[in-house]
Amino acid sequence: MTFTRGMVIGLGIALGSALLAGSSILGQDALKWKVQRQAWFEEDWPFPVDQWGTGRAFRCVAVQCGGEVHLYLRAKIGFCRCASGVSDDDEIDRVGDLEFVSAKYKPLASGYPVAVGILKGRARLFAVERPLQSPITMLAIALAHKCDAVVATVMGTPDVQAVQEGAALEYLRSEMVQHWAEVNTGLE
């Protein structure tokens, strides 16, 4: 087959366009990953120290998460049912950290199963009363592997919405949080 000069130029333009489009898509994916990763910022642990020590506190700005979101994360070694993990709503109530905000809270609905990497458990929305403030909706997430619990508390402004809940769960699946869980529990 003989290629004419026009065919070669046309083929070159088509190939160049395809490469440029592909690099643009890859660039957009890389930018999206970078933006998601930069959406969460670590803060100081705002709660008093108890028998479980301090945890890690993170904040996601409203532009990135559909409203400002605070995520509080702690490991509770040996504080989970070894055989079944977090398999029911009573376990969320038992291991959760809502009492940092208030001792007065009540579930808004039944919990539902969640999986975050190799951690499995349940999440449940609660109405939390606060002194001298309006009640707030918060999400308690209790995850387990073997006998260790990883507890996450999600507080949105003004309340946890579906977008904020999704952003928090996605952040819990991140490599950084999964590594933290491995180091701070018996996962390794």
Image (cartoon, helix red, strand yellow):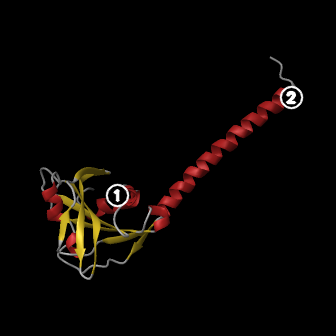
Three-letter amino acid code of the residue under disc 1: Gln
In the structure shown, which secondary structural element does the residue marked by tag 2 occupy? Answer: helix
Can you name the residue that lies furthest to the front here? Answer: 134
Question: Residue 92 at x, y = what percent?
Answer: 18, 60
User: What is the C-alpha distance between the residues marked 2 and 1?
Assistant: 55 Å
Can you name the residue that lies furthest to the bottom here? Answer: 132
Question: Residue 101 at x, y = what percent?
Answer: 24, 75
In the depicted view, which residue is nearer to us: 170 or 135?
Answer: 135
Residue drawn at (30%, 61%) of the image: 181
Q: Does residue 96 sit above or below 27 in this rendering? A: below
In the depicted view, which residue is nearer to us: 3 or 48?
Answer: 48
Residue 77, can we see it? no
In the depicted view, which residue is nearer to us: 134 or 174?
Answer: 134
Residue 95, can we see it? yes
Of the 4 image quadrants, the one containing the C terminus is: bottom left
Question: Which circle marks residue 6 in the picture?
Answer: 2
Q: Which residue is mark 1?
A: 178
In the depicted view, which residue is nearer to us: 2 or 38?
Answer: 38
Looking at the image, residue 108 sits to the left or right of residue 168; the answer is left
Can you name the residue that lies furthest to the right here? Answer: 5
Three-letter amino acid code of the residue under disc 2: Gly
Instruction: Classify mark 2: residues with Cα within 10 Å, few (<14), some (14-19) or many (20+).
Output: few
Question: Residue 50 at x, y = what percent?
Answer: 19, 78
